[in-house]
C-alpha cells in the first residue's frame, strides 16, 4: 500500500513545557485524493478556480489540503495534472489539454489579451478610493491589497472560512507555521491544558497531547514549536524536539516555585519570561547554533514578575515586568539614550508584545478601567500612540502585511467575540467586527476570543476562544479572511 508522508507539527510533551518540530505523519491512501483520481480535473470539480492544481503532500512539497488541491501550481515533482498516482514528471499528457481549455497562459481565469502592465486603477473599479455599493463593494481604501482592513476585492475582512468546536473547555493560544499548519492550546477551569495540531483547513487532526498546566506558545520559522510554563512540581522548564521528536536541547531546570508566563522566538533566539520564588522575575534567553543546539543564559532582573516578552532576530529583548510596572529592554537601539527607558506603564493586565522590523514595540493590555488598550512605542522608547476601546477585553494580536494590527477579543460580558483592525502607523481604527457565536445554525449565549494568529502565507487568520453558555463552554477555533 502506498502512503503519503505529510509534515506535521510534531506534538511531543513533557509535563508542562514542550518544543515541537515539523515531523512526519503517515496517512494511508485516501482514494478521493486528487493524486489518485483525476489530478487537476478532480480539484476543479470540487474547488473550481479557487484551488485548481493537484499536489502530492510529501515532504518538500507545499500542498496542505485534504484532497491535495492547491491555489498555486506546485513544482513538477509535486504536481499531478493527470492524477493516477503520477507526477507531471511521469505523465504530463493532459497539461496541454488543460492549458487549451484555460487560455494560453495555462492559468485558470486569465483573460484573453494578457495584462496591460499598467498598475493604475481605473475609476469606477475596486481600488479607486470610492465605495461603489452597486458593484458590491463594502469598502475601498484606494488600493487592491489585503491586510489593511479592506480586502483586495473591496470586501470587508473577517468572513468565516471554517470553524470548529470541541468537547474541552476553551482555546487559549494559537500559532501557525510556515506551511499553514495550526497548533492550538486548549485549557479548562483547572488550568489543565491540551495541545492540538490541525492542517490549514482545521480538518486533519495531526497530534494531541495533554499538558499539566496552561502554557504559552510560540513557533519558529523552521516549524519548531515551543510552549512555556512549569512542571507538576512547579519548576519552570523549556524543552525542544527535533523532527522525529528527539529532544535537541533544554535549559537547566528552574528553581522551586518558578514558572514561565511568556515564550517568544525570532531567528535563532528564544526568550522565556516569568517568575521564581522570593517574588523575583525569571528571564532566560536561548541562542541556537548551527547544529540546532541552544546556549541558555539567565538574565538577572529584580522585578517581581515578567508577564510578557518579545525578542527580535538580533536577540534584543523587550519585556513587561511589575513592581514597578514597566516596559523594559535589555539594551538600547542605535542612536538611543536612556531618556525614555524603561517606560512606566498604567495599571492593568498586559497580554502580549509585538516587535516590528524597525524595533518599534506594540503593547496589548487590558486596563483597570475595563478597556482594551493598544499602544506603540518607538525603538528609543518614545510613546507614539495609544488607542483604547472601552468595555472590551483584548485577548491577542498580530501584524498584517498590509499595514494593520489585528486584535482579537470580546465584549466585557463575553456575549460576542471581537475582531478589530488598526492602522499600525497612526493607531487609527480601520474596521471592527462583532461576532455572535453561531455554529451549525445554533446561536450560543457566549462567544469570545483569547488569541489570534496570522498564516505566514497571508491566506487566513485563526482566532481561538470559547463558545456556549455559562454551564457549557466549548473551545472554538475560528478561521477567517484577513
Image (cartoon, rainbow, N blue to C red):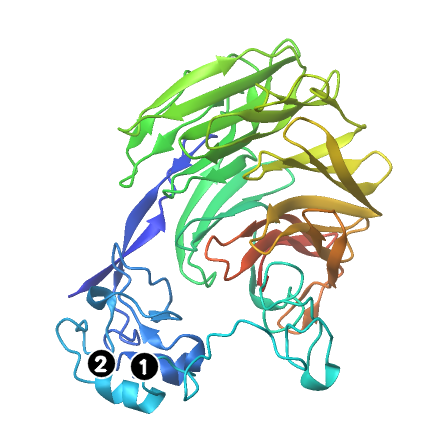
Question: Residue 3: which quarter of the image?
Answer: bottom left
Q: Quadrant of residue 251?
A: top left
Q: Which mark is residue 65?
A: none
Residue 106 tag number: 1
Name the N-terminal-most of marks 1 and 2: 2
The relative height of residue 87 versus residue 104 in the rendered view (above or below) is: above
Q: Measuring 26% from the left and 28% from the top, which residue is drawn there?
A: 291
Q: Residues within 10 Å of mark 1 (few under 14, many from 20)?
A: some
Given residues 155 and 190, the one toward you in this image is 155
> In the displayed structure, would residue 162 be above or below residue 236?
below
Spatial CA span between label 1 and label 2: 14 Å
Q: Quadrant of the C terminus?
A: bottom right
Horizontal side, residue 36 vs residue 392: left or right: left
Q: Are marks 1 and 2 in contact (CB under 8 Å)?
A: no
- Left/right of residue 373 with respect to residue 261 in the rendered view: right
Image quadrant of residue 127?
bottom right
Give percent across and percent down for residue 15: 45, 30
Find disc 2 in the rendering and name its residue. 82
Measured as percent of width and height from the top left, residue 101 is found at 32, 91
Element type at marker 2?
A: loop
For discs 1 and 2, the disc positioned in front in the rendered view:
1
Amino acid at each position: 500500500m502506498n502512503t503519503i508522508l505529510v509534515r506535521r507539527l510534531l506534538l511531543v510533551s513533557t509535563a508542562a513545557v514542550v518544543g515541537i518540530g515539523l515531523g512526519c505523519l503517515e496517512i494511508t491512501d485516501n482514494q478521493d485524493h486528487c493524486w489518485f483520481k483525476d489530478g487537476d480535473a478532480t480539484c476543479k470539480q470540487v474547488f473550481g478556480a479557487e484551488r485548481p492544481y493537484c499536489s502530492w503532500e510529501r515532504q518538500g512539497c507545499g500542498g496542505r489540503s485534504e484532497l491535495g488541491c492547491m491555489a498555486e501550481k506546485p513544482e513538477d515533482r509535486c504536481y499531478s495534472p493527470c492524477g493516477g498516482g503520477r507526477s507531471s514528471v511521469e505523465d504530463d499528457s493532459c497539461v496541454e489539454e488543460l492549458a487549451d481549455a484555460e487560455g494560453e497562459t495555462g492559468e485558470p481565469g486569465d483573460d484573453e489579451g494578457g495584462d496591460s502592465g499598467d498598475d493604475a486603477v481605473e475609476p469606477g473599479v475596486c481600488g479607486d478610493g470610492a465605495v461603489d455599493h452597486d458593484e458590491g463593494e463594502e469598502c475601498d481604501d484606494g488600493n487592491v491589497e489585503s491586510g489593511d482592513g479592506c480586502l483586495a476585492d473591496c470586501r470587508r475582512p473577517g468572513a468565516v472560512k471554517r470553524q470548529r468546536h470541541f468537547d474541552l473547555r476553551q482555546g487559549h493560544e494559537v500559532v501557525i507555521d510556515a506551511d499553514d499548519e495550526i497548533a492550538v492550546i486548549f485549557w479548562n477551569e483547572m488550568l489543565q491544558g491540551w495541545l492540538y495540531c490541525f492542517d490549514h483547513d482545521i480538518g486533519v487532526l495531526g497530534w494531541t497531547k495533554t499538558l499539566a498546566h496552561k502554557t504559552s506558545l510560540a513557533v519558529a520559522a523552521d516549524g519548531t514549536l515551543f510552549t512555556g510554563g512549569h512542571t507538576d512540581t512547579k519548576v519552570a522548564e523549556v524543552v525542544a524536539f527535533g523532527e522525529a521528536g528527539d529532544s535537541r536541547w533544554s535549559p537547566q531546570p528552574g528553581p522551586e516555585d518558578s514558572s514561565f508566563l511568556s515564550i517568544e522566538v525570532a531567528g535563532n533566539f528564544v526568550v522565556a519570561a516569568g517568575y521564581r520564588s522570593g517574588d523575583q522575575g525569571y528571564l532566560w534567553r536561548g541562542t541556537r547554533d548551527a547544529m540546532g543546539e541552544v546556549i541558555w543564559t539567565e538574565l538577572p532582573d529584580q522585578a517581581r514578575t515578567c508577564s510578557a516578552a518579545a525578542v527580535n532576530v538580533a536577540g534584543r529583548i523587550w519585556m513587561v515586568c511589575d513592581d514597578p510596572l514597566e516596559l523594559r529592554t535589555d539594551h538600547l537601539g542605535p542612536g538611543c539614550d536612556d531618556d525614555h527607558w524603561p517606560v512606566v506603564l498604567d495599571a492593568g493586565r498586559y497580554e502580549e508584545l509585538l516587535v516590528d522590523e524597525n524595533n518599534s514595540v506594540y503593547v496589548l493590555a487590558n486596563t483597570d478601567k475595563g478597556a482594551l488598550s493598544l499602544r506603540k512605542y518607538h525603538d528609543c522608547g518614545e510613546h507614539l500612540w495609544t488607542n483604547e476601546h472601552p468595555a472590551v477585553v483584548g485577548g491577542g494580536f498580530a501584524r498584517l502585511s498590509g499595514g494593520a494590527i489585528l486584535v482579537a477579543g470580546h465584549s466585557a460580558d463575553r456575549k460576542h467575540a471581537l475582531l478589530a483592525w488598526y492602522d499600525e502607523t497612526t493607531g487609527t481604527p480601520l474596521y471592527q467586527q462583532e461576532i455572535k457565536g453561531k455554529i451549525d445554525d445554533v446561536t450560543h449565549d457566549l462567544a469570545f476570543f483569547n488569541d489570534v494568529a496570522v498564516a505566514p502565507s497571508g491566506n487566513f487568520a485563526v482566532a481561538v476562544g470559547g463558545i456556549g453558555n455559562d454551564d457549557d463552554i466549548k473551545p472554538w477555533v475560528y478561521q477567517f479572511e484577513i
